[in-house]
Amino acid sequence: MSLTPQTYWAEHAWIDHEVRPAVLVTADADGRIDTVTPGVTEPPPGAVPLHGLTLPGLANAHSHAFHRALRGTSQAMPGRTGAPGGDAAATGSFWTWRETMYAVADRLTPESYYELARAVYAEMALAGITAVGEFHYLHHTPGGVRHQDPNSMGAALAAAADAAGIRLTLLDTCYLSAGFGAPPGPTQTRFSDGDALAWARRVDALDLGADTVIGAAVHSVRAVPADQLSVVGDWARERGAPLHVHLSEQPAENADCLSHHGRTPARLLADHGLLGPATTAVHATHLTAADIALLGTTSTGVCMCPTTERDLADGIGPAVALRDAGSPISLGSDSHAVIDLLEEARAVELDERLRTGRRGHWTAHELLTAATRHGHAALGRPDGGRLAPGAPCDLATVALDSVRTAGTRP
């Protein structure tokens, strides 16, 4: 889609890991950055002034849009003073929360999914997010019957992203089992295509337009039998598509994988050829030292989602060890308890402080790189996340005159 060429004048801009004052950015008719010129002291006539600190648009590398409906409904705890009602999701664990999430999934239609996702993606856009990776497994009708258009739920997400003005990477997710070969439960039948080959045929029929990147996802080693993992991996590899997978989010997943396969989930993925630079492991919370080395030496990316991981009491992932091993770190808001990529970035550092009792594990530019360049790369958009010629002219400006930022240097 051709656009009108545009010029922006940024009071401050983050370029090559440093903040530069008075930066002029011009975009061409295709919406890509043409020139970046620091030191332009005044905005020229016709330029759009951006007062504050301008960053490349943020990338939300892991989203479940329909989880947003749970915000504010699964926190009240029965029996506590001032908290009438409530539900079990506020007390137990990830697994009890999951039952509440399934109840939401059961009610969604393509029409209501569009309305919900449009609002979620608009909230992201207001938070400076310009690209999102939707980990999409809500494929069919309740009971598992296919819609007349088997991809109508994915099409609803693409339409919602377009309406909200955000770039979508649809990570169409293979989800076949309730756990290590067990048949899908009542709600999970909405997620399952029956087998990985049927999943691949359905995804091949997706036609969402040139602006949407179509990627693949393995829900988890629990939900895709080991003998079908390579089908998903091969599909992504043959198409040069990004591949994502929930990995070791819960200790129970590790224990069950060891019981069924005699190896950790990370080792199982490696043995079936699913690790590598085009793969992003989501969460990676409960890893062994060997798992960390395996992800790092294969340059497998890792998406940390700390506001969700703390909300669900999942634990604190080994982000520093993964970074040091060679894994690019990206960020996601996942269940959308909070939609704030800068808070996700802060939490990566602050959670490590709590865990270690020491400050200073990440530099600001490392955290911003996770929220921008690494996130866009994980979503199959390697040219994004930077203010440089040829990159998409997707900009996010942080106000420096708000109550929250008063007194802070750019």
Image: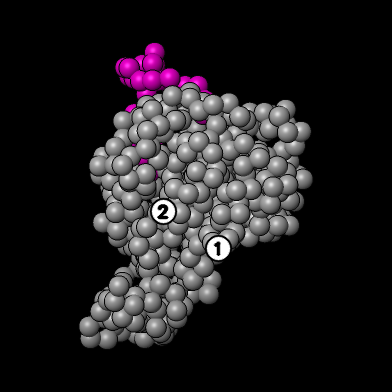
Q: Is residue 244 above or below residue 140?
A: below
* Residue 127, quarter of the rendered image: bottom left
Query: What range of the chain is rendered magenta?
Result: 65-94
Left/right of residue 154 with respect to residue 43 in the rendered view: right
Find residue 169 and report its horizontal and vertical position in percent. 43, 56
| Of the image marks 2 and 1, the number of the one nearer the N terminus | 2
Q: SS class of the residue under badge 1?
A: loop
Q: Which mark is residue 205?
A: 2
* Total numbered labels: 2
If the image is split into quadrants, where does the C terminus sit? Answer: bottom left
Q: Residue at x 45, y 81 (%)?
A: 389
Left/right of residue 206 with respect to residue 232 in the rendered view: left
Q: Is residue 41 above or below residue 370?
A: below
Q: Residue at x 33, y 39 (%)?
A: 147
Residue 347 visible in the current orientation: no
Q: Residue at x 31, y 80 (%)?
A: 29
Magenta segment's dominant SS is loop
Q: Tell me, yes or no, whether the highlighted magenta stretch contains residue 312.
A: no
**Mark 2 neighbour class, 10 Å CA radius: few under 14, some 14 to 19, many 20 or more:** few
Tell me the mark number nearer the camera, choosing from 2 and 1: 2
Q: Tell me, yes or no, whether the highlighted magenta stretch contains residue 80.
A: yes
Q: Residue at x 66, y 57 (%)?
A: 276
Find residue 376 and report its horizontal and vertical position in percent. 49, 62
Which amino acid, mark 2?
Ala
Q: SS class of the residue under badge 2?
A: loop
Left/right of residue 70 with respect to residue 352 in the rendered view: left
Task: Between residue 104 and residue 346, name the one nearer to us.
Answer: 104
Q: Which mark is residue 240?
A: 1
